[in-house]
Image (cartoon, rainbow, N blue to C red):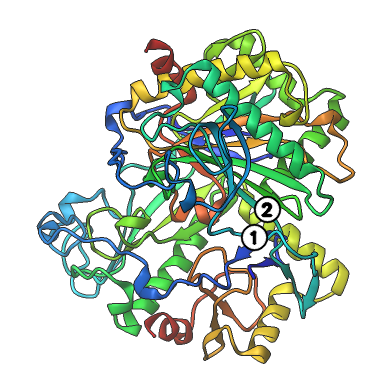
Amino acid sequence: MPELRRDPVVGRWVIVDTDHPNKPEDFEYEQNIVKGGLCPFCYGNEFMTPPEISCFRDPNTQANSPGWQVRVVANKFPALQIEGELDRRGLGIYDLSNGIGAHEVLIESPFHNKDIPELLPEEIESYLKMCCVRASDLKKDSRFKYIMVFRNYGSAAGASLEHPHTQLVALPMVPKNALEEIHGARDYFNYRERCIFCDIIRQEIGDKTRVILENKYFISFCPFVSRFPFEIMIMPKQHSGYFCHISAEEVVALAQILKETLAKLKKVFLNLSYNYIIHSAPINGEVDVEYYHWHLEIMPKLTQVAGFEWGTGFYLDPTSPELAAQYLKAV
Amino acid sequence: MPELRKDPIIGRWVIIATERARRPDQFSGHIHDPEEAKACPFCEGKEAKTPSEIYAIRPRNPTRNGPGWDLRVVPSISPFLRVEGDLDRRGNGVYDVMNGVGAHEVVIETNQHIANMADLSEEQITRVLNCYSDRIADLEKDMRLKYVLVFKNYGKGSGGGAIRHTRSQLIATPVNPKRVKEELAGARQYYEYHERCVFCDLIKQELEQKERVILDFDGFVAVSPFAARFPFETWILPKKHGKRLIKIIIGISRLCHA
């Protein structure tokens, strides 16, 4: 019998196929094969990107030249533009504004061929530290109300370049998906006087069936209400609204759990494309972060979202999270 | 300068890349398999390959699951939801669960191996639309069900699968889907403020501004929405205010055909 499961944060129902679940070998997905070639993110090609905004590099090396460990540049084809003020206006029944925002690309490492599982722990820690540095910096701009950190890996997942990279987009309003989580979390907090994410973490640790990995500061698990097969959530055990407030010890723990979780995912699905996003609290607003809890969502690119999902906002998961977690724990 | 535009119904902002517009020829399509027609289970004569029909328009042969039909509705071979059983609503700690009760049907729009609905006659498209209406009315009688979604996945890139025989699906769910709730909530909020329907206002504004109107006749209008999420997203709206899909007049079928 398929099961309908309700996400307690946003109130969304998903349909989980518990009858005839898809096993890993049942998924047909576009394989991500790294071809190499001329790359604007590799050493020696720094002139091909816009000038760097921020960088961790070896001492005695120049900006926009090799010798860096993590490099941040403006996106050459930005979705939004940094200059100007918000110009909100109406057009009859419609609302619009000029597209103000920041759009940065964070090149995670000098290695064209290495995904996060292949990097050293220190290299992943540097990458995460830089995400924090950039998020903290963008937070100072009072025009921005939300920072979206996201990563597309593999062209099937929307990565336009092979060299692994993460993007940061700062928006002048809180986007709908984030707002829904925030309102859902606030309603739960008003009802229970507890953070819903903390309650979810507690339940998952107690239940164990969906937990993949756990360390001192983080837990990775397949959410009870997975929207996609093998969807994974990484959450800090310590309640915190902002990703960029992460402590030094937490960065080490996050690097470890991210590396190991992605390594497991890629062992189950060879040449997988995937996306991940960081949901963090809004900035420069009146949001009380007492009830919001930042987290990272990993979405493997195994299925397509089609008419039913677009029409209803329902998701269909052909592999229950319990089964997915079993496969991930086994490798 | 990219533009931020807000959908007035559900309050979602989209980013419109006004400068880096892509032309139609800059989107890539999908190549299809020329052999797939032989394997098609939806063509006339292949009725044994589908589950037993729920509904059919049979002017030439009244026998169920035989040839001689113009339109046929069958249950889905791999249904997302099942008709049998109880909801059995229960909690699981912070989570809520129920059984996946519902209906999942496939509307086979023509007895021939035609891929695109636009290639059907207006008369045939009218039959399809009236079929949607009839099936919804029938499924409505089941008190466990709260919503019926009619949808079509056309083409390999959109979940249409390899078989290129034009068809659509109906899924009935025991809960109101999120997207629908959002639209209803947004429409109600607008109504409470303006005492007018947001869709009626939208249609009026689009007809005045004209620049996003694609087609307009026989009581229906096809527009590119102001806050489009996707390139070439299109909406078809009845000009007359009505909340349910009722027996359709020839108008919308001409619009689909166009």
Q: Position of residue A160 (x, y in %)?
A: 42, 50
Question: Is residue A295 among what the camera can see?
Answer: yes
Amino acid type, callout 2:
Ala
Secondary structure of the residue carrying numbered label 1: loop
Q: If the image is split into quadrants, where does the C terminus of chain B sit?
A: bottom left
Query: Would you say B239 lies left or right of B22 here?
Result: right
> Disc 2 is attached to a residue of which chain?
A
Amino acid type, callout 1:
Leu
Circle nearer the N terminus (1, 2): 1
Q: Position of residue B51 (x, y in %)?
A: 26, 48
The number of numbered badges drawn on the structure is 2
Residue A158 - label = none
Say few, some or many: other residues with alpha carbon within 10 Å of mark 2 (under 14 / 14 to 19 / 20 or more). Answer: many
Q: CA distance from mark 1 to mark 2?
A: 6 Å
Residue sitting at x 28%, y 78%: B119
**Relative depth, front residue between A328 and A134:** A134
Q: Position of residue B208 (x, y in %)?
A: 68, 91
Query: Would you say A215 lies left or right of B115 here?
Result: right
Residue identifier under label 2: A102
Dots 1, 2 in contact, CB < 8 A: yes
**Relative depth, front residue between A327 and A272:** A272
Query: Would you say B191 lies left or right of A7 here?
Result: right
Residue sitting at x 75%, y 26%: A196
Residue identifier under label 1: A80
Say few, some or many: other residues with alpha carbon within 10 Å of mark 1 (under 14 / 14 to 19 / 20 or more). Answer: many
Q: Position of residue B132 (x, y in %)?
A: 44, 66
Specify whether disc 1 shares its chain with disc 2: yes
Residue sitting at x 85%, y 74%: B195
Q: If the image is split into quadrants, where does the N terminus of chain B sit?
A: bottom right
> Disc 1 is attached to a residue of which chain?
A
**Residue A89 sits in which quadrant?**
bottom right
